[in-house]
Amino acid sequence: MKKKIVSFLVSGRGSNFSVIAENIKQGYITADLGIVLSNNGKAQALEIAHSYGMDAFFVDPKNYTDRESHEKEMIRLLKSYSTDLVVAAGYMRILTPHFINSYKNRIINIHPALLPSFPGVHAQEQAFHYGVKITGCTAHFIDEGTDTGPIIMQSAVSVLTDDTPTSLAAKILKEEHRILPEAVKLFCDNKIIVEGRKVKII
């Protein structure tokens, strides 16, 4: 069976990207590394990509007239590397329907809350200030909504009385690093079937 090629969209430090890349390099995830694309020329993830011998590109949104033309260049690059799966690992731009439809049910995102609760940005702080006792993270496919795509995996984290937004975010990140590689592995092993909103793991 031909290995799938996994590429990444990043905007910052790239911790989730690094964890997946390491799992692929060590052979836990049966896949090949593709490319890294970033909307931020100073993203640390670009340097991490080079350390894995990957090609990495800063695709500057300012060089394009609109989101779709920016994404067309991203799609061109992804296809030139025969990308099968796109992982949004801390990518801080909303993807347009044009991009999503080009990789329908082939874009995995990690969100730092138990969706459908607390979608959007600063989810850890949202959960903390709301006063929930349990929060966590969700690996899901990206669709045209904001954090509304089919859920692949979730992991719960208890919110303790002495937690702060910072300590809670750290606990959630630890779980992100655990379940996102698992979701990618399931995809690469052809163990995921998407039926409407539901993801079946076979």
Image (cartoon, rainbow, N blue to C red):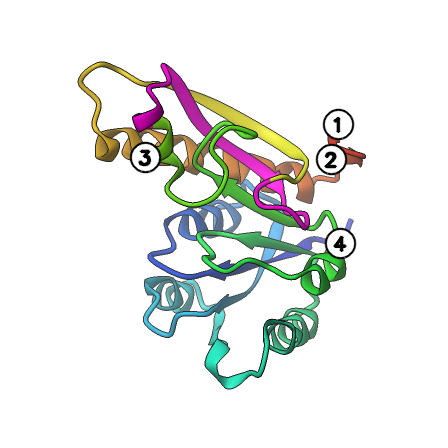
Q: CA distance from mark 1 to mark 2?
A: 6 Å
What residue lies at 75% left-to-right and 32% top-to-bottom? 197
**For marks 3 and 2 on the same chain, the one whose residue lies earlier in the sequence:** 3
Residue 199, by quadrant, is top right
Q: CA distance from mark 4 to mark 2?
A: 17 Å
Residue 157 locus on image (x, y percent): 38, 21
Name the residue nearer the viewer: 25 or 91: 91
**For marks 3 and 4 on the same chain, the one whose residue lies earlier in the sequence:** 4
**For marks 1 and 3 on the same chain, the one whose residue lies earlier in the sequence:** 3
Q: Which residue is mark 3?
A: 125
Q: Read off the magenta span.
A: 128-147
Q: Secondary structure at mark 2?
A: strand
The quadrant of the image that shows the C terminus is top right
Looking at the image, the residue that sits furthest to the left is: 162
Q: Secondary structure at mark 1?
A: strand
Q: Is residue 168 magenta?
A: no
Q: CA distance from mark 4 to mark 1?
A: 22 Å
Q: Amino acid at mark 4?
A: Lys
Q: Taking 101 as reference, is 14 left or right? A: left
* Pointer 4 local density, CA inside 10 Å: few below 14, some 14–19, many at least 20: few
* Pointer 1 local density, CA inside 10 Å: few below 14, some 14–19, many at least 20: few
Residue 128 locus on image (x, y percent): 31, 27
**For marks 1 and 2 on the same chain, the one whose residue lies earlier in the sequence:** 2
Q: CA distance from mark 3 to mark 4?
A: 42 Å
Residue 198 locus on image (x, y percent): 74, 29
Q: Are marks 1 and 2 in contact (CB under 8 Å)?
A: yes
* Pointer 3 local density, CA inside 10 Å: few below 14, some 14–19, many at least 20: some
Mark drawn on residue 2: 4
Q: Is residue 135 magenta?
A: yes
Q: Which residue is mark 1?
A: 200
Q: Which residue is mark 2?
A: 192
